[in-house]
Amino acid sequence: MNDAKFRVGLISDTHSLLRPEAKAFLLGSDYIVHAGDICDSAILEELGAIAPVTAVRGNNDKGDWAGQLAGDEFLQVGEVFLYVIHDLADMVIDPKAAGVRVVVSGHSHSPSVRERDGVFFVNPGSCGPRRFKLPIAVGELLICGQSVSARTLELDIAPAG
């Protein structure tokens, strides 16, 4: 049995804004997953200075830099397989049949953690510009062996001005 422990920082829907509160939350991550709508390649460079990044293309990611991103990605962290996609409606795999333990998505801007049939579905929400009255949020996975815990966290954002 492997006792290695990993922290995976989860982020999505930055829409060209990487808030300092989000960067602070991600410090100490072993890996970072960005579930799309990055909108600026400089964000991936900033995140890459913290930890290795796996990112997927969102519906708002345009241009040559975004064309290099896949629409979905598989990632193995320790003994656990993750599947990353921007919009769950575009998912064409059966995660349980594929051996996936965690599906990370974005798009809705609404943070959530659900477990269905032994698979975690985690949406870290949006940490970019506020949309409607939805929270500014991030997420994390803690992985030890085959054990996974997942959470989202609403960031305490200082009011502008």
Image (cartoon, helix red, strand yellow):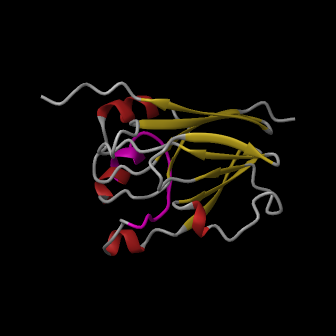
Q: Is residue 27 visible?
A: no
Residue 137 lies in what quarter of the image? Answer: top left
Residue 88, visible in the rendered structure: yes
Vertical relation: 96 (above or below) 48: below
- Image coords of residue 90 (percent x, y): 58, 69
Q: Position of residue 140 (x, y in %)?
A: 56, 36
What is the tally of numbered marks visible in this picture? Answer: 0
Who is closer to the viewer here, 57 or 42? 57
Q: Which of the image's four quarters has the N terminus?
A: top right
Residue 138 lies, with reference to residue 69, above or below; the image says above
Residue positioned 52% across, 69% down in the render: 71
Vertical relation: 32 (above or below) 3:
below
The quarter of the picture where residue 142 lies is top right
| Residue 126 percent coordinates (x, y) | 41, 45
Q: Which of 140/52 is in front? A: 140
Residue at the location (38% across, 29% down)? 24
Over which residues does the magenta segment extend? 45-59
Outermost residue to the front: 133
Drawn side of residue 77 relative to residue 28, left or right: right
